[in-house]
Amino acid sequence: MADLNPIGKRIHNISPDPVRLTLDDGTEAVFRVSGAEFFQQEFQAEGTRDDDEGAAYRFVSSADNDAILVGRKGPDEEGWSMIGEAVKAEPVGAP
């Protein structure tokens, strides 16, 4: 059996406490993640950001499970847009 994605595992282990994610473009933000779970190797979760009121976020494994992709849907938007790949996950307050 293949290993679980390490970023997905980290998000899963930290949630429901706030998670600081770093995206592949260098963006850092604190997310409140809910429903983090694995289906075999595939990861999925939903979340919000305190500094982005009304927006919803989804975190999903890429097709090959090598990356955790982050999608966003704003309060006035019809569909989802991909905002990047999570490259680091830490508990809030970690050095």
Image (cartoon, rainbow, N blue to C red):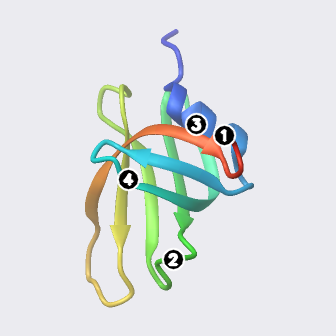
Residue denoted by label 2: 51
Q: Which mark is residue 95?
A: 1
Name which residue type carries label 1: Pro
N-term mark: 4 or 2: 2
Disc 4 element: strand
Residue lying at 53% horizontally and 22% vertically, measured from the top left: 4
Q: Amino acid at mark 4?
A: Val
> Is 34 located above or below residue 12 in the figure?
below
| The quadrant where residue 81 appears | bottom left
* Among the two numbered marks 1 and 4 on one chain, the one whose residue lies closer to the N terminus: 4
- The residue under the point 53% across, 25% down is 6
User: Where in the figure is residue 46, as x and y percent of width and height?
Assistant: 53, 60
Circle number at residue 38: 3
In the displayed image of the protein, which residue is found farthest to the top?
1
Evaluate if marks 2 and 1 touch, with contact meaning CB atoms under 8 Å apart.
no
Report the mark closest to the observer, 3 or 4. 4
Q: Separation of disc 3 and disc 1 at Cα? A: 27 Å
**Label 2 environment density (alpha carbons within 10 Å; few <14, some 14–19, many ≥20):** few
Q: Say which of marks 3 and 2 sits in front.
A: 2
Helix or strand or loop: what does disc 1 sit on?
Answer: loop
